[in-house]
Image: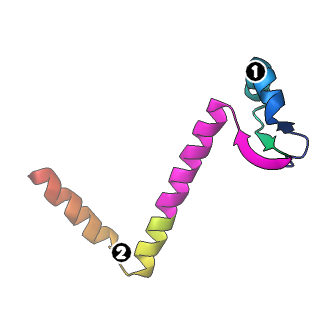
Amino acid sequence: MRYSTQVKPISYVKANAAQVIQQLAQTRQPLLITQNGQAAAVMQDLASYETDQEALSLLKIIALGRRQVEQGRVYTVKQALAAVRGRRKK
């Protein structure tokens, strides 16, 4: 995705906040905000932000799992089932 079409100066965002928010919700594309000609921030709608956060959380869980496998912290299916059954009996 190219963000070059979604670039606005902060003065535009200030003057047109309601319109900007409405456009973000409709397009679900982030907006790059510039200040003094330099990229300063990215603005996105809430639904996209929540989706991104969920995806990031899943990626962190996957990375943690990979590290555990690399460290040898794994169980066979038999061991895992025994552990679960042991917990259910308590």
Identify which residue, 82 or 32, lies in the foreground.
Answer: 32
Residue 12: image quadrant is top right
Whichever of callouts 1 and 2 sits on the residue coming sooner in the sequence is 1
* The label number, if any, that marks residue 74 in the structure image: 2
Sort mark 1 into few (<14), some (14-19) or many (20+) by Cα contacts within 10 Å.
few
Query: Is 56 above or below relative to 76?
Result: above
Q: Which-is-in-front pick, marks 1 and 2?
A: 1
**Secondary element at image label 2:** loop
**Magenta part mainly helix, strand or loop?**
helix
Q: Indicate the amino acid at tag 2.
A: Val
44 drawn magenta: yes
**Residues under labels 1 and 2: Cα distance?**
48 Å
* Residue farthest front in this picture: 36
Q: Residue at x 86, y 47 (%)?
A: 37
**8 shown above or below 52:** above
Q: Position of residue 30 (x, y in %)?
A: 76, 39
Depth check, front residue: 53 or 14? 14
Residue 57, position as x, y percentages in the image: 51, 51
Residue that carries the numbered disc 1 in the rendered image: 22
Q: Residue at x 90, y 46 (%)?
A: 4
Inspect the image, locate mark 1, and give the three-letter code of the amino acid beneath it: Gln
- Name the one closer to the observer, 11 or 51: 11
Rendering coords of residue 68 (x, y %)? 40, 73
- Looking at the image, which residue is at 83% across and 45% down? 36
What range of the chain is rendered magenta? 37-62
